Amino acid sequence: DTGVSQDPRHKITKRGQNVTFRCDPISEHNRLYWYRQTLGQGPEFLTYFQNEAQLEKSRLLSDRFSAERPKGSFSTLEIQRTEQGDSAMYLCASSFPPDRNHNEQFFGPGTRLTVL
Amino acid sequence: KQEVTQIPAALSVPEGENLVLNCSFTDSAIYNLQWFRQDPGKGLTSLLLIQSSQREQTSGRLNASLDKSSGRSTLYIAASQPGDSATYLCAFINTGTASKLTFGTGTRLQVTL
């Protein structure tokens, strides 16, 4: 499978715990994006990387959230001190830069987080 | 700030019917537009991408159009099938950022036998 992969697919945690999600993009893509989707809504942008560099962060990304892409390949999204409002589907996407393939984004299956 | 609206929020049609899903947006500075399909509890599957300079794209039974002057995009599905049942999302990248997608809330489609 050469698509975007995410791990785990489901995570149930208690409020106050820390969680970490992983995303492996399509191997040739140098851009990687994180989005969050709550029930009945469209995904909302959180942050994105070009290679190792984190180029933009949404105001939705509070200081409890941190994302890394240390070697320009896979990325991790960590949520510290989880709250019930963090319950959502966390989606990862990847793309080429805009000058190649017009920044068409391809999504992974998502990680469903439930905070009890 | 780009706002994206999808109407209707839900739609039920009998198998074989042709249908149109609508997406409207407020900022015409569009870099590109993507239509996605999302099955319940799953990720997003890219269906079509329309570049800013294009007016439409076709893939099989799907045709998407873009009219920046009116702030509208439509997704036309011909000869609908039960397997088309899913939520359809439109999303835009603005020219200024050329990066993040701004999504509508989606249209939930059910195609009945």
Image: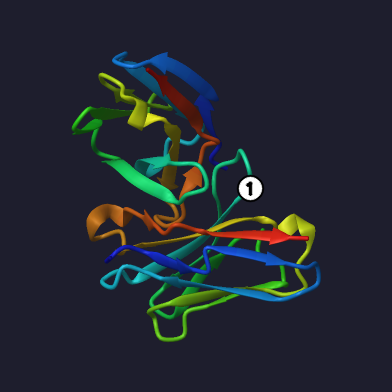
Q: Nearer the viewer, residue B60 or A95?
A: B60
Farthest residue toward the front?
Answer: B113
- Residue picked out by circle 1: A38
Image coordinates of residue B15 in percent, x first then y, are 33, 17
Q: Is residue A114 above or below residue A76?
A: above
Farthest residue toward the bottom?
Answer: A71
Res. B67 visible in picture = no
Element under label 1?
loop
Res. B32 visible in picture = yes
Residue located 60% across and 40% down the image:
A41
Q: Chain of mark 1?
A: A
- Within 10 Å of disc 1 (Cα), the crowding (few <14, some 14-19, many 20+) is some
Label 1 amino acid? Thr
Residue located 47% across and 79% down the image:
A69
Q: Quadrant of the C terminus of chain B?
A: top left
Image coordinates of residue A11 in percent, x first then y, are 62, 65
The colouring scheme, among rainbow, by chain, secondary structure or one colour, is: rainbow
Relative horizontal placement of residue B28, taking residue A59 as reference (left or right): left
Residue located 31% across and 41% down the image:
B47
Image coordinates of residue B94 in percent, x first then y, are 43, 47
* Res B78 → quadrant: top left
Q: Nearer the viewer, residue B92 or A108?
A: A108
* Res A114 → quadrant: bottom right
What is the number of callouts on the image?
A: 1
Residue located 77% across and 73% down the image:
A81
Image coordinates of residue A73 in percent, x first then y, are 38, 79
Relative horizontal placement of residue A13, taking residue A29 as reference (left or right): right
Q: Is residue B33 above or below residue A44?
A: above
Q: Quadrant of the N terminus of chain B?
A: top right
